Amino acid sequence: MKPFYLISVFFLTVCLCAQNAPQYTVNSNGTLRAKLIPEGADNYSENGIYSYSYSIGAVTDEMRELHSYRLFKNSTQQFEMKDVPGSDVTVSGSGYSLFYDHSMHFNREVTVNVYSPSGSYLFSKKYRGASGFTFSDEGNFLMVRHPGSTDLVELQTGSSRRFAPGLASYYNEKAQRLVIADETVLIMYENDTEKFRILHQNGLVRRIAVSEEGDMVAIISGERLAVFDLSGRQIWHQFAEAGKKYRDIKFEGSQLIAGIHSKNEKSSQGHLLRFDGLGRILESLDGSLRMLPPVKKLSLPPKNSVGYEPISWPFAPFDSARIVWNHYEQHMGYGADTLSYLHQGLDLIIPIAEPTYAVKGGIVKCVLTLGGAAYWRAAISDSQNSGVSDGWLYAHLIQSSIQVDIGDTIQQFDHIADIVAWTSTWAHIHFVQIKDSGTVWLYDDDEWGINFNPLFAITPLNDIQAPHIKPVFPHSKFAFTKNETNQYLSADNLSGVIDIVAMTVDSVCGSEWQQPATSVFYEIKNNTTGAVVKPRTLAHILNHRYSFYDSGNYEPYAGIIYKRNQQLLPSSWMSITRNYYHNLTNSDGDSVLTLQERELGLDTRDYPDGEYNIIVYAYDASGNSSADSMIVNFVNGISSVDEENTPGGFIVEQNYPNPFTAGTVIRYRLAGSENKNISREVKIRITDILGREIVVFNAGVQPQGSYEFNINEIDLKGLSSGIYFYQVSAGENKIIRKMIYLR
């Protein structure tokens, strides 16, 4: 009996030791990692039992084609899939593969395609504005954070239940307890019924954990850890030490493990604390240490030459330009004339796992994924308040490398994260300044506004190559169509209201990927007299503000800035040589873009028949420019006008800008004779399209000479957008012209 007793005791001791052996270690950023997972690996289930691999094919700015997907369980392959139905993948602790289809990302939509551990298709769900995907403790459920709710989805059946929204959530399958927390409230549901709802004191909750038996709930903010019982009573709490932040928590039996992060300019290190059920520290360990490379900080002026606060490049060295892949408001499509959109940000190509740094200090307002490991992003605002503020967005981060979390304060040039592989050979960051409200920014409130083109702020922008103006067609430098149609016109026979199309390409800082010119202007000269009949007019500047990152805000504008049809297709993302067909005449001449400008065009009937020279100017963000021109003929049956056959030597020019919003200028000239200077009483009368008088301005008695008269919004207060006429009278002579007012 003795040998059997000794063997039994030994076996029991081994089992207990194995049961109590730590299952987790800590990454250098303070997040906890199952010991089965190699450090830095993001292609594992959270418990480390499942891993996966795939190859990357063609890509766009927000999509990747994935092929040859393989799922492994403890290194044994479970199934293989040739073509993946999505741009990214995560795997639950029970082996469910979730493929995230981002093909409609410009509508804020992601479709989650769910497959069983053996590779069978189960179901698909589409979400709009989702910004968080978390598995339950055993991996049989998915929690989705999206506008107004937290959804709990059973992965085997696809059944979904809806609960309160929150910053963080956790589902214990065994006890069937779901816990959700926002900035002030902690809620527990048991079997879908609310068990308690309390006010907590942790502020911005980063993580939630529920004990294996479901009898304890733990939450953390950066500074505070708190544990509650099933009645919602706080059992104990613990503040983080100075210079450290809580980043992660998990239960092992009745013991709680906390992942903690400490960071300075030289290093980033994770730490692990193990607590018993009463909050006593059982173990304190230092985890992975990452040494950060030294960086040379830049000294930047408060404002640059175009009025923006300068920022550095978001990579070290900070004064070194990176490869620009996709430009702000770049026109892109999918090979058809039915759909295209404007790229809302700046995409830079960098080496895989390149560290990115804060271009400006501030408060971290968001750290989230839009679906999958490649879609993690962080935003850093210039202030911490619940109102509206601006912040720089850094997208496509390696999750295990992220050095910040919501509520953290960081300094300019601090390391934020490393950039995830986008192809097999390079990574890319999506970088832009956004606007949102609240102490935490989610993707669910129609506020994630896009502010401006980062190239106007990046310093230094060492770009010496000017944009090129290329022929739209082999036989024609520019293209001409009837306004808002695809009916092309001959340059020798232009009549009525037309659109003028010019093609530009640029190479920002020497990038091999072609981008559009940042701004395009045009002017028109009478080729016979040499007179400028259309002063230099801004067609478009690629620096427009959008109220929200959504195609409903910016997709319709693609067809205003650019011409798109079967002959003039937008380029695809992986084309190095690209086409940007600017519609010059869809503009009222200012830098504000409105949907009403789609109907605008050049009315050739405002000018006498004859030969004209259309001159196009293209600029980049550094001010480099080029120009090109084309001779055309206006043919409307309108004879030429000069001072001799103008009544009383009286000339009235077309108002500029036209159309206009804030104001416009009417220029006119009073001519005398060889023998005397003639003075005349001048009046300017504004009427609507029915001839009803709106307002009359008396300019007084004026001698010969050239004059300008300014009309502003106050003068036209109360008027709606539309066509109006202005009549300039000088003595008995009158000339009437048309103008367009846009509110």
Image (spheres, rainbow, N blue to C red):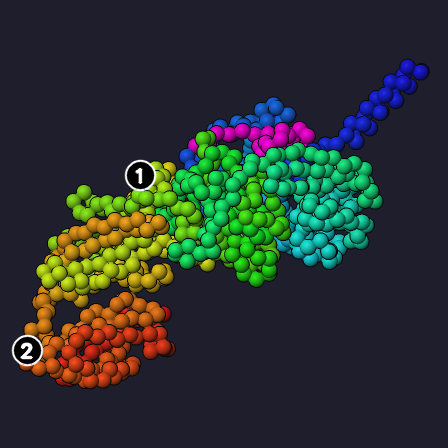
Q: Which residue is the site of mark 2?
A: 674
Evaluate whether residue 193 shows in this view. Answer: no
Q: Earlier in the sequence, mark 1 or mark 2?
A: 1
Callout 2: SS: loop
Q: Are marks 1 and 2 in contact (CB under 8 Å)?
A: no
Q: Is residue 591 above or below residue 716?
A: above
Evaluate whether residue 607 shows in this view. Answer: yes
- How would you rate the neighbour count of disc 1 (Cα within 10 Å): few for under 14, some for 14-19, many for 20 or more? few
Callout 1: SS: loop
With 282 as the anchor, is 23 left or right in this view? left
Q: Quadrant of the N terminus?
A: top right
- In depth, the one of 291 and 364 nearer the eye is 291
User: For residue 33: magenta?
Assistant: yes
Picture coordinates of residue 354 (x, y %)? 51, 36
- At 19% across and 59% down in the image, what residue appears? 524
- In depth, the one of 169 and 41 nearer the eye is 41
User: For residue 237: magenta?
Assistant: no
- In depth, the one of 284 and 326 nearer the eye is 284
With 433 as the anchor, is 232 left or right in this view? right
Extent of the magenta region: 31-57
**What is the quadrant of residue 641 in the picture?**
bottom left
Picture coordinates of residue 239 (x, y %)? 75, 49
Q: Specify the amino acid type for callout 1.
A: Thr
Q: Nearer the viewer, mark 1 or mark 2?
A: 2
Q: Which residue is the site of mark 1?
A: 577
With 78 as the anchor, is 592 left or right in this view? left
Picture coordinates of residue 253 (x, y %)? 78, 37
